[in-house]
Image (tube, rainbow, N blue to C red):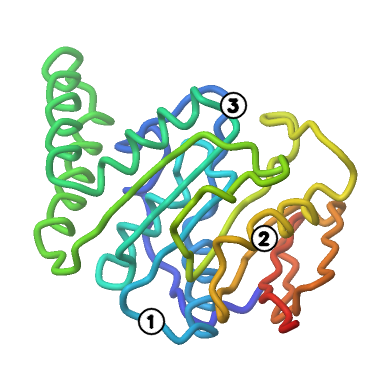
Amino acid sequence: MEYRYCERTNFEDFSSGRVFYHGAGITNFPVRLVQEIFSRCLSYIENKGDVCIYDPCCGGGYLLTVLGFLNPELISVIIGSDINKSVIEIAAKNLGLLFKEGIDARIGELRELHNKYNKSSHLEALESAGRFASIIQKRSLKMKVRTFQADILADCALMDQEFKADIVITDVPYGNLVSWEGQDNMIGVLLKNIRPILKRDSVVAVCSTKRQKINVASYLRLEKQDVGKRKFEILRMAEN
C-alpha cells in the first residue's frame, strides 16, 4: 500500500496494554494505517481544524484514542458507541487518557506497578505515558469526548443523537475475537443508520475483511484500498 500522508515511524507508545487499557475480545488497529485513513478522509472535507469524529463500533476506543493523540490540533470532538456495555466502559477509560486527569491517574497506576514488580515494561510504559502527557500539555485545541451504548444495526439507532460528525471511521467486527450478530448486508445497514449524524460533506471510512461486502447504495465511493487481508473504503453520501 502507498502511504500518502503518514510516514513510517515508531508507534510503540500506542501498543495495547502498555498505556492504553485493554480487555478480552477487544481488537486493535495498525496505528500508521488509521492515521493514513484519517488524513485521507480529512482531505475530502471542508472543516479541517475543528473536526468531530465518530466510531459506531468503537470497542475499547483504541482507534479513537490513537487519533486523538496523533491529531491534537485537528480533532475537537471524539464520539464512540458500541453495542457492548463492558467494552464501552473501557473505551471511556481510554478516551479519558486524552485529558490531564486521566493520564495522571494512569501514570500513578503504572508507577505503582513499577514500584511493586520493578519490570522494565512498566518503566517503558511510564515513559510512553509521559510523552502522552506532554502532548496534552501542549494541546491548544479544546477537546471533548463522549461514549454511549448503541446497536448501530438497530433501526433509529442514532435518531436521538444531536451531534454531527465530519468523519465516521470504523473497523467493523470480524474474525474470532469479536462477533457481529445480525442480518445480511450488515455494513449496508450501518451506512443507512449513520445518515442522521452526517453533514453534507461528511466522509465515512469503513474497514473490513475483503470478504465483507459493502453495499454503497446512496453513497459515493471516493476510495477503495486493499491492505493485506483487509480493505478500507472511503465514502460520501450521494446528493438526493
Callout 2, which amino acid?
Val
Pinpoint residue 53: horizontal percent, then vertical percent: 45, 61
Pinpoint residue 31: horizontal percent, then vertical percent: 47, 57
From mark 1 to mark 3, how far is it between C-alphas? Answer: 34 Å
Q: Are circles 1 and 2 on residues that touch, CB within 8 Å?
A: no
Pinpoint residue 183: horizontal percent, then vertical percent: 86, 39
Residue drawn at point x = 36 percent, y = 45 percent: 146
**Pair 3/2: label in front:** 2
Mark with earlier residue (1, 3): 3
User: Which of the labelled discs sits on residue 25, or is there none?
Assistant: 3
User: Which of the labelled discs sits on residue 101, or is there none?
Assistant: none
Residue drawn at point x = 20 percent, y = 43 percent: 129
- Indicate the quadrant where residue 123 lies: top left
Q: Is residue 169 placed above or below 186 in the rendered structure? A: below
- The reply, left or right, for residue 232 in relation to residue 66 is right
10 Å crowding of disc 1: few (<14), some (14-19), many (20+): some
Residue drawn at point x = 80 percent, y = 56 percent: 188
- The reply, left or right, for residue 212 in relation to residue 47 is right
- Indicate the quadrant where residue 232 lies: bottom right
Residue drawn at point x = 53 percent, y = 48 percent: 160
Q: Is residue 144 placed above or below 124 in the rendered structure? A: below
The residue most toward the top is 116
Callout 3, which amino acid?
Gly
Secondary element at tag 1? loop
Callout 1, which amino acid?
Lys
Secondary element at tag 3? loop
User: Which of the labelled discs sits on residue 206, or is there none?
Assistant: 2
**Pair 1/3: label in front:** 1
> Considering the image in quadrants, where does the N terminus appear?
bottom right
